[in-house]
Amino acid sequence: MRLKFYTMDVFTDKRLAGNPLAVVRGADGLDASRMQAIAREFNLSETVFLMSPRDPVNTARARIFTPAAELPFAGHPTIGAAILIAELDAPELLGGQELQIVIEELIGPVTCSVRRPKGRPARAQFVSPRLPERLGDGDVNAIASALGLAPEDIGFDAHRPVLYSVGVGFTFVPVRTLDAMGRACAQMAAWNQAIGPQGHAAAYLYTREVLDEKSHVHARMFSPALRIAEDPATGSAAAAFAGVAMEFEQPDDGEHVLVIEQGIEMGRPSQIVLTMDVTDGVLTGVSIGGSAVIVSRGEIEL
């Protein structure tokens, strides 16, 4: 049995930057255990397996695996898969119009739009399948120990550690400075005490201090429990971050766009565009956008 695979760099328009992704096509004959084994073989933060949709009105069905576990939803696999489908199946159309692609994920159908700006790599945007759900509060002292930081490094203005999810839970940690962001590192002896027992084994650090003047937020994400020491770009966390922004910034009604830079400390600079729609003081829509490029292609022999 041979299956075609592609690797992509996502949330970047340059190869060897952004967040690497493996995409396996024609995976209908694989069971979950075989998909998990293949994801461990690629050993990237996520591998997405594309299959025929259950509902023929949709474009494809996807299952997403880290090296350690399956996820119900993830951002950079969604962006990467949508762009790959458009590039391979409708390249002529992609150059002249925006394509609508619906990917069935465990969380439900995810609607994506894909376009290729003239002379630039393709870009995709998806509507978050859920609005952010608040799951609780984080303990500053415990989180500081888990990240190798001092308690005074955490928090600015009204921002404090909280937990949000749009399908995958994250502990959101506001960090005062870029210097502290650079010093942060997962401390495994303290990690499970601060992050793991709550069932949200990923920490998303963010600060207002940025390196690129076009960015609004600088971020890092650690998830050692999922065998992701650090992630270069985390779309599902960016979608959940909309809940954090609503809680602590209380934006006016209208559309708000935040550019998030991530992966810089890893040498994998990434850019995620978060769009928030606010009506009558309530978050009514969240979407995530970014570019992706194909890096390699081949066949898996099973």
Image (tube, grey):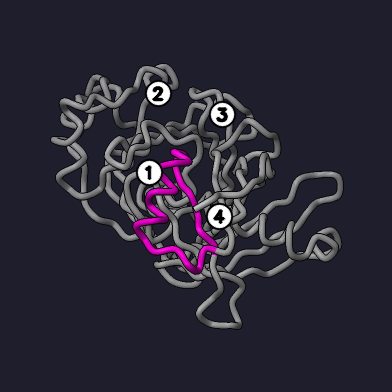
* Residue that mark 1 sits on: 67
Label 1, label 3: how far apart the Cα atoms are:
19 Å
What's the amino acid at mark 4? Val
* Residue that mark 3 sits on: 268
- Residue 202 visible, this orientation: yes
Q: Nearer the viewer, mark 4 or mark 3?
A: 4
Between 192 and 151, the residue placed more toward the observer is 192
Residue 121 included in the magenta stretch of the image: no
Q: Which mark is residue 181?
A: 2
Left/right of residue 63 with respect to residue 137 in the rendered view: right
Q: Residue at 59%, 47% (x, y): give it.
A: 273
- Mark 1 lies on a secondary structure that is loop
Label 4, label 1: how far apart the Cα atoms are:
15 Å
* Residue that mark 4 sits on: 24
How far across and down, in percent of the image, does residue 267 sit? 55, 23
Query: Considering only order in the chain, which callout, 4 or 2, is on the residue closer to the N terminus?
Result: 4
User: Which residue is most to the bottom?
Assistant: 56
Quarter-of-image position of residue 89: bottom right
Magenta region: 27-50
Query: Considering only order in the chain, which callout, 1 or 4, is on the residue closer to the N terminus?
Result: 4
